[in-house]
Amino acid sequence: MARPSLLPLSMHTSLELKREVEAVQIPSGESIKLPLGLKVIITQSLGGTYTVATDFGLARISAKDVDALGIDPEAQKKEQESSSSNIPDDASDLEAQVWNQLKNVYDPEIPVNIVDLGLVYDCHVEQTEDGKSKALVKMTLTAPGCGMGPTIAADAQSRIMTIEDMDDAAVELVWEPAWNQGMISIEGKMKLGMI
């Protein structure tokens, strides 16, 4: 008998983990194990990952482990594919495709993608000597000491590598200029209730 999908889950619903699961502690970025039966509250589910509140703080559960939340992985996969299917009109423009994929990467504590948060400082695609395409992205974080930086950068790289004609991607964390709220796009400010 197929397990029913719980998607869409309503935010702030309390549930118990169906199995032990690897997670990333927010904001330290440390790997932790959440035990079977732990009560969690989903606070964000954007970009294919889930931020959950526990008695000892926030943690992030990756898309590959959604079954621990009682979510059907196949339903999650279909939802994620539909959210990343916004291919630009000019599909041959790899840079536009990279920007599109970066709009599917989220800070686990802020419900706005990294592009609209103003965290992506540079993005371009180069052709290597052997004719391969490589995306080069420079991004920052809202706070330099955030331990989630490598995780968010890895998410960005993973998203970029879903592009059919992309051979390689490098996402570099940079700290200058320092990020500030003025860098958030109008769309991002609207989502955050700033305007």
Image (cartoon, rainbow, N blue to C red):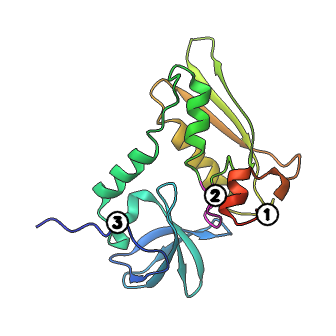
Determine whether the residue tagged by mark 1 lies in a helix, strand or loop: loop
The residue wearing badge 3 is 7
Check the picture and name the quadrant holding the C terminus: bottom right
Which residues are the magenta region? 106-112
Identity of the amino acid at label 2?
A: Val
Q: Which of these two is toward me, 114 or 151? A: 114
Horizontal arrangement in the rendering, residue 39 relative to residue 95 (left or right): left
Instruction: Work out whether residue 120 or residue 21 is closer to the camera in this orientation and state it.
Output: 120
Q: Earlier in the sequence, mark 2 or mark 1?
A: 2
> Alpha-carbon distance for marks 3 and 1?
34 Å
Q: Is residue 163 left or right of residue 16?
A: right
How many neighbours does mark 1 have within 10 angstroms: few (below 14), some (14-19), or many (20 or more)? few
The earlier-in-sequence mark between 2 and 3 is 3
**Element on which disc 3 rests:** loop
As measured in the structure, the alpha-carbon distance from the residue carrying label 2 to the one carrying label 1 is 20 Å
Which mark's residue is nearer the viewer, 2 or 1? 2
| Residue found at x 62% / y 36% | 99
Q: Position of residue 95 (x, y in %)?
A: 62, 27
Amino acid type at mark 1: Gly
Residue 80 spot, x, y in % from top left: 41, 50
**Figure quadrant of residue 164:** top left
Screen quadrant of the N terminus: bottom left
Say what amino acid the circle numbered 3 marks: Leu
Residue 10 at what x, y percent from top left?
43, 74
Determine whether, in the image, residue 4 is placed left or right of residue 24. left
Please tell me whether residue 135 is drawn above or below residue 144 in the rendered image.
above
Of tags 3 and 1, which is closer to the observer? 3
Residue 112, numbered label: 2
Q: Secondary structure at mark 2?
A: loop
